[in-house]
Image (tube, helix red, strand yellow):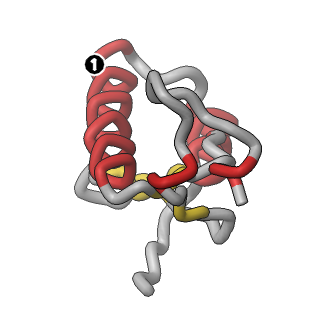
């Protein structure tokens, strides 16, 4: 586990106001990369919100939360949808 001594996304917006377009885009691109990475490993985050995004002093965005779930690929219905069984 990594300790990140920075504010979460909500704290940053509360303190600094809305992000400039370039900063928001950089965060969104990093999050898309992270979500693609965990999706490839059949992991579902289930609680993406500003409080679960941490931004380090060098601009790296970290996704945190303890609500991660591994999806069982064998229970996934045809067509790539999600069933109630795939969320357990």
Say if residue 54 shows up in the picture. Answer: no
- Image x and y of residue 58, in percent: 23, 56
Nearer to us in this view, 69 or 23: 69
The residue at the point 56 percent across, 57 percent down is 7
Q: On the picture, is 15 further left or further right than 30? A: right
Q: Does residue 85 appear to the left or right of 81 in the view shown? A: right
Q: Where does the C terminus fall, quadrant-wise? A: bottom right
Residue 76 picture location, percent across and down: 53, 42
Along the line of sight, which residue is nearer the eye, 2 or 72? 72
Q: Which residue is mark 1?
A: 22
Is residue 44 something that shows in the picture? yes
Assign a secondary structure to mark 1.
Answer: helix
Look at 68% across and 64% down and name the residue there: 67
Q: Residues within 10 Å of mark 1 (few under 14, many from 20)?
A: few
Measured from the top left, where is residue 26 in percent x and y? 27, 30
Residue 42 placement, left or right of 60: right
């Amino acid at each position: 586990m990594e300790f990140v001594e920075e504010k979460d996304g909500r704290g940053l917006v509360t303190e600094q106001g809305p992000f400039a377009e370039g900063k928001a885009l950089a965060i969104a691109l990093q999050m898309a990369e992270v979500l693609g990475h965990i999706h490839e490993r059949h992991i579902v985050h289930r609680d993406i919100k500003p409080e679960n995004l941490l931004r380090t002093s060098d601009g790296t965005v970290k996704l945190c939360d303890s609500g991660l779930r591994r999806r069982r690929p064998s229970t996934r219905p045809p067509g790539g949808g999600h069933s109630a069984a795939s969320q357990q």
